[in-house]
């Protein structure tokens, strides 16, 4: 524990990774207000957990050293309502999603903790915990016109991004995966792909989550999110905009 506390203090003494965030990026719009507040506190002299602990914090954020050795992260959160947090950009975005999507984060944690209580810690997460982790790290929520949803579900990229381009102002895409947010911040690139949930994620049971009902979406293809996608040829890259697989 002493070594972990020392490492955390060392991290605080280094340049913090939140300095270069461009809050005008469209994918950061849902996080902008709380994000700038937490960023300012973190860049001043607070630790990241302290910076995240605003009056409206849905959970109490604590240093990573508060996690007892051997206790799973998700089980600890469910037991204590505290979120172990490291001094890095990954956990910065995790904390911001807790602030902006508290019900969703709580539901993911509830399902993770229930699976751990039932099955214990295993060498592999298992199908349910794997699906929950995938979405927690790389997920997104989409509300939009039926034409866009249908095109996403069938991977009809031309319909989704070219022919249906005028429909995107009616859509709301929220990235909730903190690993994806981190990558968009530090290394935005064409291949970054969200696992999109369409519909009410809060109403889904464990079996639905386990089936991974997600749809892949290369997020920099979203109109207005990346200047290069104004050229329709941007979507011709089949290594990124992959066709749907034929069903057996």
Image: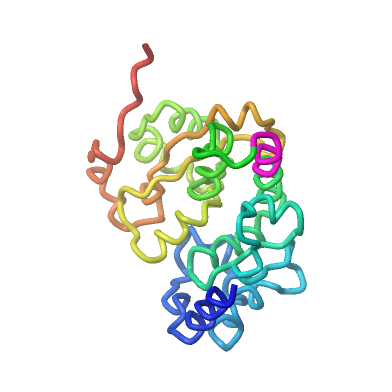
Q: Is residue 162 rendered magenta in the image?
A: no
**Image quadrant of residue 91?**
bottom right
- Relative to 229, is 77 on the left or the right? right
Report x, y in % for residue 89: 48, 68
Along the line of sight, the residue nearer the viewer: 49 or 231: 49
- Relative to 107, is 166 on the left or the right? left
Residue that protrudes farthest toward the top in the picture: 248
Q: Report the colour scheme.
A: rainbow
Along the line of sight, the residue nearer the viewer: 13 or 169: 13
The quarter of the picture where the C terminus appears is top left
Residue at horizontal 62 percent and vertical 52 percent from the top: 72
Residue at horizontal 44 percent and vertical 75 percent from the top: 17
Report x, y in % for residue 128: 58, 33
Along the line of sight, the residue nearer the viewer: 84 or 171: 84
Location of residue 209 with respect to 76 vertically, above or below: above
The quarter of the picture where the N terminus appears is bottom right
Report x, y in % for residue 16: 46, 80
Residues drawn in magenta: 112-119
Magenta stretch prevailing secondary structure:
helix
- Relative to 102, is 134 on the left or the right? left
Number of callouts: 0
**Image quadrant of residue 197?**
top right
**Image quadrant of residue 20?**
bottom left
Residue at horizontal 65 percent and vertical 72 percent from the top: 52
Report x, y in % for residue 207: 64, 26
Residue at horizontal 49 percent and vertical 63 percent from the top: 90
């Amino acid at each position: 524990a002493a070594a972990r506390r020392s490492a955390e203090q060392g991290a605080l003494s280094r340049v913090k990774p939140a300095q270069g965030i461009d809050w005008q990026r469209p994918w950061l719009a849902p996080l902008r207000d709380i994000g700038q507040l937490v960023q300012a506190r973190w860049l001043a002299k607070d630790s990241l957990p302290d910076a995240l602990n605003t009056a409206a914090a849905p959970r109490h954020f604590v240093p990573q050293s508060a996690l007892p050795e051997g206790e799973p992260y998700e089980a600890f959160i469910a037991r204590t309502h505290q979120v172990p947090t490291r001094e890095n950009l990954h956990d910065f975005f995790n904390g911001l999603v807790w602030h902006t999507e508290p019900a969703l984060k709580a539901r993911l944690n509830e399902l993770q903790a229930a699976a751990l209580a039932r099955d214990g810690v295993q060498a592999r997460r298992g199908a349910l915990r794997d699906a929950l982790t995938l979405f927690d790290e790389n997920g997104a929520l989409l509300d939009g016109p039926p034409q866009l949803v249908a095109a996403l579900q069938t991977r009809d990229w031309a319909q989704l991004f070219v022919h249906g381009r005028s429909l995107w102002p009616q859509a709301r895409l929220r990235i909730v995966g903190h690993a994806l947010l981190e990558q968009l911040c530090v290394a935005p690139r064409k291949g970054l792909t969200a696992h999109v949930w369409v519909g009410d994620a809060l109403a889904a049971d464990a079996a639905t989550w386990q089936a991974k009902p997600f749809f892949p979406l290369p997020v920099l293809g979203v109109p207005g999110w990346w200047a290069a996608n104004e050229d329709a040829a941007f979507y011709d890259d089949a290594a990124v905009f992959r066709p749907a697989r034929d069903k057996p």
